[in-house]
Image: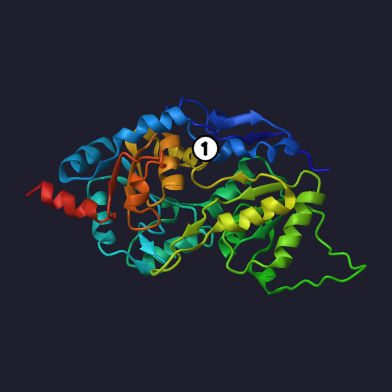
Amino acid sequence: MFCHPSLVLVIINQPNRASGSRYARHSAQLSSSHLCDCASTIMGDIPAAAKSESASFSKLLTSHNLRQLLDSVDAFLFDCDGVIWKGDVLIHGVPDTIDMLRSMGKNLVFVTNNSTKSRRAYAKKFQTLGISVREDEIFSSSFAAAMFLKVNNFPTEKKVYVIGEQGILDELESAGYTGLGGPEDGRKTIEWEQNNLFDHDKNVGAVVVGLDRHINYYKLQYATLCIRENPGCLFIATNLDAVGHMSVMQEWPGAGCMVAAIRGSTEKEPVVVGKPSTFLMDFLLEKFDIPTSRMCMVGDRLDTDILFGQNAGCKTLLVLSGVTTLSTLEDTANHIQPDYYTSQMPDMHKLFGESVK
């Protein structure tokens, strides 16, 4: 039985991050049998009182308050889908905005829940779109899944089954783990035959579920058996996004759909490592040594990007070029309010130009 008693990260709300060792702030002693049952604590929900308290602070970004924001921030954290691009189409004006922020000496980080690519593949995508971004400036949920295993001393002799795409497999390999499944299993089929036992690898110690354009019944059965039958098998979700801008014209089902299927078949809750979980924030703090109060999260989703920023104690800027609409933001049922909002990320460049005239 794989029962790993080492430290398991539990992400909690920490608007004011205390000093301490790299991961001690988020640690608790949990056995692997408790991990999936306790995973909901990683989801990063903020208290209702804090939500209502923040509701009155959302402001339309203007040339005046943009200068205040720029003066108070040393690092900007950008989501990608719906903020930098839609599918493979770059949002007009993004390169000029990135160049402007770099010229000001701002640190830039790209934090994406899309697990279909590795950090290396994302760096190539940026390059293809004419933007120079280093691999170490990219933090994807595929990377987060691999790092979660790494920092929790997941045994390298154990295997990881993947419902997802090549990005997760690549990051697992970079971290020293053997990944199974992924795109290869997208071509496999399954038949219901009497007296036929569906076989699965008993040495799988974790299942990672992310966005998968080739999800099928074979993958669902394989992952379900690993979690239900392999002792101590971990259930890790890259994120719970319901939809995403995978193309310019419309939204498409997100990783949350795949996670929901496995959650239903296993009756287990996953460990969620992507936004709004603040797991990746430890890596950002180590890289930049900048307090979160001097960071600003820029994203198009309230329940992931903005909540991630709020949970970590960052300033937040919502752009309306992706999932969230103005009507959603202003809906009385919405209790996640950013510090600022604007139509799209390049507004920062336009408004800064107006402020210096």
Residue 5 at x, y = what percent?
73, 34
Q: Secondary structure at mark 1?
A: loop
Please tell me in which quadrant of the rendered image residue 53 appears: top left
Q: Residue furthest left?
A: 357
Q: Quadrant of residue 33?
A: top right
Question: Is disc 1 surrounded by few (<14), some (14 to 19) or many (20+) residues within 10 Å?
Answer: many
The residue where tag 1 is placed is 44
Is 336 situated above or below 119?
above
Residue furthest to the front? 332
Identify the residue shown where x is 35% and y is 35%: 55
Q: Position of residue 93 (x, y in %)?
A: 25, 62
Q: Is residue 207 visible?
A: no
Q: Between residues 327 and 33, which one lies in front from this camera angle?
A: 327
In this rendering, does residue 307 appear at all? yes
Q: Residue at x 75, y 60 (%)?
A: 222
The foreground one among 320 and 112 is 320
Q: Is residue 348 left or right of residue 126?
A: left
Badge count: 1
Q: Position of residue 250 (x, y in %)?
A: 42, 67
Residue 60 occupies quadrant: top left
Q: Position of residue 11 (x, y in %)?
A: 55, 35
Q: Residue at x 39, y 39 (%)?
A: 288
Q: Nearer the viewer, residue 185 or 118?
A: 185
Q: Is residue 290 above or below residue 140?
A: above
Residue kind at label 1, given as amino acid type? Gly
Question: Which colour assignment does the render follow?
Answer: rainbow
Between 117 and 103, which is closer to the camera in this rendering? 117
Horizontal arrangement in the rendering, residue 158 relative to residue 355 (left or right):
right
Residue at point 64%, 48% (across, down): 236
Rendered view: 155 above or below 255: above
The N terminus appears in which quarter of the rendering? top right
